Image (cartoon, grey):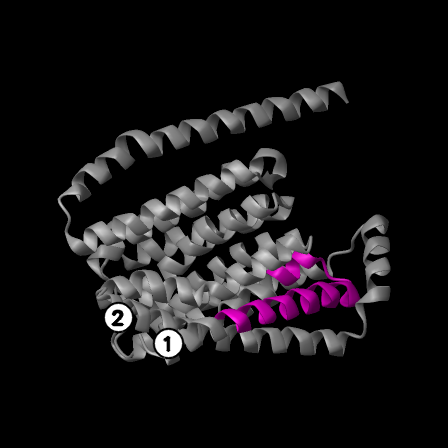
């Protein structure tokens, strides 16, 4: 492999880490300076900014007629965000989950993913479908702006006021956010180029590269931002970034790719048969996991990581047409997925009983 490919890999990783640090620091202090909850910043400014690589790749792919790459990038990125980004972040530091995410944003993520799936069932996301998704994106952003303007309690204002004293002037924080976003976009591009060169050097097919490396590479800003945010204690930014990015991917990235493509965006059969249902299931799985204790525990993060590994293994087995693919599918459908569902249901019921017992005791 050429030294330039190694340089792209290492340089991209370095830019991602520096960009994530600048973005988290600027966004958290900007929230304090403007009196806005960090969760809202994470769901909008940070989430939309870190999804810029997905937008650029999918729109370019749609215009070039590479519908499979455009669709696979969005769905693969959403799975990467939920299963790997949240999984790794919570494995390092258990992440607190706000009530707004459970009551509003995760249900919205489930709903818009289901809507995109329904719109795609005819085998194409037309320009009108893309326009619908973009209108919903504008409505969701308006909802977040309204939430940012909602009056908060005296305790919250006092807490924000104390942070504002150390936050610095807001133009400086905006500069940090913009600089961090620029480094994230540049670093992810370098890293994707280096990773694709490595994959070709290893003899891996282009289809598999698109489903895994491109989707994962464009989601590296979310990974770097959420991990850094969790370690720095900005846990609302960590979870809000992932949920907001996934909503942005479905509404804006898919919507723009479909609306700007001359004939809309053809939907590959693989996406309808496998990728869309898996992305919808992953979004839905956030509800019980987020609800239990209003945090993502380490074991739940580990569960997410196991499922992402299983997803990638499935892609490799499917691309290589291995005979073991059928046995792997049976094992997942008959044993692993039902066992996980039973575990999550049991934990949720216990959490509900504990909450009721606590309310009765109070």
Q: Label 1: which residue?
A: 5
Looking at the image, is mark 2 or mark 1 earlier in the sequence? 1
Q: Residue 150 got which mark?
A: none
Foreground of the two, 18 or 351: 18
Q: Secondary structure at mark 2?
A: helix
Left or right: 49, with 328 as reference point: right
Q: Residue at x 70, y 60 (%)?
A: 148
List x then y, in percent, for residue 96.
64, 44
Against 294, residue 76 (above or below) is below
What is the span of residues highlighted in magenta in the rendered image?
A: 13-42
Q: CA distance from mark 2 to mark 1?
A: 10 Å
> Magenta segment: does it hold 145?
no
List x then y, in percent, for residue 4.
38, 80
Q: Residue at x 57, y 37 (%)?
A: 291
List x then y, in percent, for residue 304.
44, 43
Magenta: main secondary structure equals: helix
Q: Residue at x 19, y 44 (%)?
A: 325
Against 98, residue 227 (above or below) is below
Q: Label 2: which residue?
A: 201
> Magenta segment: does it hold 27?
yes
Q: Are marks 2 and 1 in contact (CB under 8 Å)?
A: yes
Residue 231 seen by the camera: yes
Badge 1 local density, few (<14 within 10 Å), some, or many (20+)? some
| Residue 284: quadrant of the picture | top left
């Amino acid at each position: 492999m050429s030294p330039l490919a190694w340089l792209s890999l290492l340089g991209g990783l370095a830019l991602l880490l520096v960009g994530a640090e600048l973005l988290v620091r600027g966004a958290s202090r900007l929230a304090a300076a403007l009196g806005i909850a960090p969760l809202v910043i994470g769901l909008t400014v940070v989430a939309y900014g870190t999804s810029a690589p997905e937008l650029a790749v999918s729109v370019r792919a749609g215009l070039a007629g590479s519908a499979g790459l455009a669709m696979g990038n969005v769905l693969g990125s959403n799975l990467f965000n939920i299963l790997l980004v949240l999984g790794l972040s919570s494995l390092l530091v258990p992440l607190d989950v706000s009530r707004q995410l459970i009551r509003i944003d995760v249900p919205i993520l489930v709903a818009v993913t289901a809507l995109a799936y329904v719109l795609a069932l005819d085998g194409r996301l037309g320009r009108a479908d893309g326009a619908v998704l973009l209108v919903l994106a504008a409505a969701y952003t308006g909802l977040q702006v309204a939430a940012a303007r909602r009056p908060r309690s005296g305790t919250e204002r006092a807490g924000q006021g104390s942070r504002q004293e150390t936050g610095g002037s807001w133009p400086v924080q905006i500069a940090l956010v913009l600089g961090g976003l620029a480094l994230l976009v540049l670093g992810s591009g370098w890293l994707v180029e280096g990773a694709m060169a490595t994959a070709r050097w290893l003899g891996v097919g282009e289809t598999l590269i698109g489903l895994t490396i491109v989707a994962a590479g464009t989601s590296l800003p979310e990974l770097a931002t959420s991990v850094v945010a969790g370690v720095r204690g900005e846990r609302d930014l960590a979870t809000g970034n992932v949920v907001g990015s996934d909503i942005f991917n479905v509404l804006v990235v898919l919507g723009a790719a479909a609306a700007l493509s001359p004939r809309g965006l053809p939907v590959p059969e693989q996406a309808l048969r496998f990728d869309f249902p898996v992305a919808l299931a992953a979004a839905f799985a956030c509800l019980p996991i987020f609800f239990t204790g209003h945090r993502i525990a380490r074991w739940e993060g580990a569960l997410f990581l196991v499922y992402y590994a299983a997803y990638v293994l499935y892609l490799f087995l499917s691309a290589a047409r291995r005979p073991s693919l059928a046995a792997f599918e049976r094992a997942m459908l008959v044993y692993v997925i039902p066992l996980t569902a039973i575990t999550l249901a049991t934990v949720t019921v216990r959490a509900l009983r504990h909450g009721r017992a606590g309310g009765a005791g109070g």
